[in-house]
Every structure is written in C-alpha cells, then in structure tokens.
Amino acid sequence: MKSIEVVAAVIVHDGRLFATQRGYGEWKDYWEFPGGKVEAGETREEALRREIREELETEISVDGFLCTVDYDYPAFHLTMHCYRCSVLSGSLHLVEHEAARWLSPDELDSVLWLPADLSILPLIAEITDETSLSMKKKLVVINACVRQKESRTLRIAEPIITSLSERYSVIRYDLPEMDGIVPLNPKLFEERGTGDIPAWAVKAAKDIAQADRIIIAAPFWDMSFPAALKCFFEQTSLFDITFTDNGQTCVGLCKAPKVLYITTRGMDIPTGDPREQATPYLKALGSLWNLGELTTIAAWNMDYSSAEEIDKKISACISEGLELSVNW
Ligand SMILES: Cc1cc2nc3c(=O)[nH]c(=O)nc-3n(C[C@H](O)[C@H](O)[C@H](O)COP(=O)(O)O)c2cc1C
C-alpha cells in the first residue's frame, strides 16, 4: 500500500483550535488540521511553516511536537506528525480551504473530521482542557522597579502586561520581592561549579529560555539599570539553559523572538544617546541568549518635568505599549 507522510498544525489561540474544511477530492467538506507533505531537504517544522504560509498566508511558530498518528485509509497509509503551533503574523486567510473555524474543546465534535484527524482529538481535547493556560504562549516579566508602588516605570508597564495577559500566560519575576538576587559571591560561584545552583535561578533561566515574549521593566539607574537586574541576569545566565557553546563560541538557547524593555529616565537622555547603556546591554545579552528584536519604550527627563508633564509622558508610553501589544 502507498504510504504518505504529512505534518499537521494544531494551532491554538485562547484555548481554541484552528480547523479547516477540505475543499477538494474524496474527502471534500471534511475537517482537518492544516498542513501537508514534507518536501525533500525540509525539516518537518520547515514544511509546516511553508504549508501554512502557502495555504493560509500566515506565519506560524512551531511550539512543540504533539504526536504522530498512523492511519490506514482505503488507498494509502498515512503517517501524520502533529505539532502545536501559534500564529506569529497574518490572519489565516483561506487560499485552498473551503471554510475554517476556531473550535473550543467542547465544539470539537461539532464538525465532521477526517478519520486520522479525528483519532487525535481525545489527546488534543485533554491537553486543551487541562492546560489551556499552558497552551497560551508564555510571557516572562522581569520587574526590577525598586521603588515598587512609587515606580513610574511600573505605572507604564502594568497596563501593558495586563493587556498582554489576555493572550499570554504571564510568569513574573518581581525582583524587589525576591530573596537571593545577589551578585555571584565566592560561595555561590563555587557552588555553581559543582552544579549546586539556587532553585529559583534554574527555574527563572528555564522560564526565560522557554518564553515566547519577555518584558523587562527597570528604571534608568547609573546610566543603565539597577544592580539587582544585573544580579538576576548573572544568576540566570546558565550554561545549557539560557546558552551553551558549540566548541568555538557561545550559542543562545532562548527562543523569544521579541523583547520589550520599559524604562523611565531622570535626565534628558533619549534612547540611543551614548550615555544610555541599558538598551545596548540588553541587545548584547539578547545576542548571547538568542533573544530576538528588542523594543525600548522610554520616558525621559522625568526628574526635571512638572507633575503634569510626567503624567503626559507616562500616558504616551502606555499608549505606545498598548498599540504595540496588539500584534506583539
Ligand atoms: C539610584 C538612582 C540612580 C539613578 N541614576 C540615574 C541616571 O544615571 N541617569 C538618569 O537619567 N536618571 C537616574 N536616576 C533617576 C531615575 O532614572 C528616574 O527618577 C526614574 O524615573 C526612576 O524610575 P522609577 O520611578 O520607576 O523608580 C536615578 C535614580 C536613582 C534612585
């Protein structure tokens, strides 16, 4: 019997699954997870991204392997590798399919599925039901606003984080509330050498490595940021978690394609000013850890502005962040 090997995208958004209705052939009008065949020289992930680009004019990220289904259709044997995916850009425009729907877990049996796709629904329903939060993408927030409730930086960051929490599951590291945010002293350094690393640091490093997005909120101090943030980076820059090496140089192990840095500065120092050393530092760290595009949202001259001007600057930054957050 002929064998066909395909990849399928289980695209999840807000706990709902994206399904398409086939517009051709013997199984016309049946529902399926979009995808297609792997071409020579392609990885499965590459094939999936290409297929969704071609079929739905949409860029996706392939977030993880779900399962492989083997199914005997009358005319061929199908092997289908299913991956959990999410939309990066585009609106899943139908090029080849007849119709498409976002299905909640309890709507999964409301459409007529292709047999192979049907066979994985119990697994997918289970995953969506039990961990619909973990199906959301992960946003790691690193809050280094030492002045806490008084912080103007945090006033900007909080509404943006709240808005993003609708689409992301948020993991927060509020440094002013954490113990252990200290420099690598001789004792910690020696323990690190034996693999005895503080549990919080291992968890934070793993969260950072697995994050889909990262927000860093930190006031502008000493021309960069509070030392606590440097201590946090020092302790989470962990070999084989946030980075590794390939025998010749260091290679990042993180995957977040976007990082947002929110700050307020006392002096009249705009982003890009040579005296502003936080953005360049975060870019350099991003290149070590393999983080993607860094956006800086900043208000400056805060210590030399009237209360009214400060409020205006904060509002402008919040608007900029909320606007960005729509497609971020
Ligand atoms: C310890 C400390 C260091 C600071 N260093 C700088 C600096 O180097 N350059 C600057 O423009 N402002 C500096 N500032 C001013 C802060 O950047 C400014 O007040 C900022 O808005 C504080 O943010 P926050 O309200 O989120 O705490 C410093 C403030 C403090 C308390």
Image (spheres, helix red, strand yellow):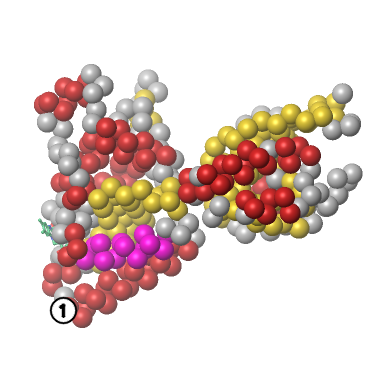
Q: Along the line of sight, which residue is nearer the eye, 34 or 149?
A: 149
Q: Along the line of sight, which residue is nearer the eye, 16 or 255?
A: 16
Residue 35: image location, x then y, percent: 70, 42
Residue 191 location, quadrant: top left
Q: Along the line of sight, which residue is nearer the eye, 5 or 163?
A: 163
Residue 65: image location, x then y, percent: 58, 34
Tell me the quarter of the image containing the N terminus: top right
At x 65% / y 43%, what residue is drawn?
A: 9
Q: Answer with the quadrant where ligand 1 appears in the image.
A: bottom left
For residue 197, side relative to residue 304 (left or right): right
Look at the numbered disc 1 and say if its residue's Cβ is closer than 8 Å to ligand 1: no
Q: Residues within 10 Å of mark 1 (few under 14, many from 20)?
A: few
Q: State the extent of the magenta-drawn residues as a range.
A: 152-164
Whether 162 is among the magenta residues is yes
Residue 304: image location, x then y, percent: 13, 73
Residue 208 location, quadrant: top left
Label 1 sits on what residue type? Ser
Numbered-mark total: 1
At x 25% / y 40%, what residue is drawn?
A: 233
Whether 315 is among the magenta residues is no
Residue 68 location, quadrant: top right
For residue 323, side relative to residue 6 (left or right): left
Predominant secondary structure in magenta? helix
Residue denoted by label 1: 306
For residue 214, side relative to residue 3 (left or right): left
- Residue 294 visible in the displayed image: no
At x 83% / y 52%, what residue is drawn?
A: 29
Q: Along the line of sight, which residue is nearer the eye, 155 or 275?
A: 155
Residue 263: image location, x then y, percent: 25, 60
- Residue 303 visible in the displayed image: yes
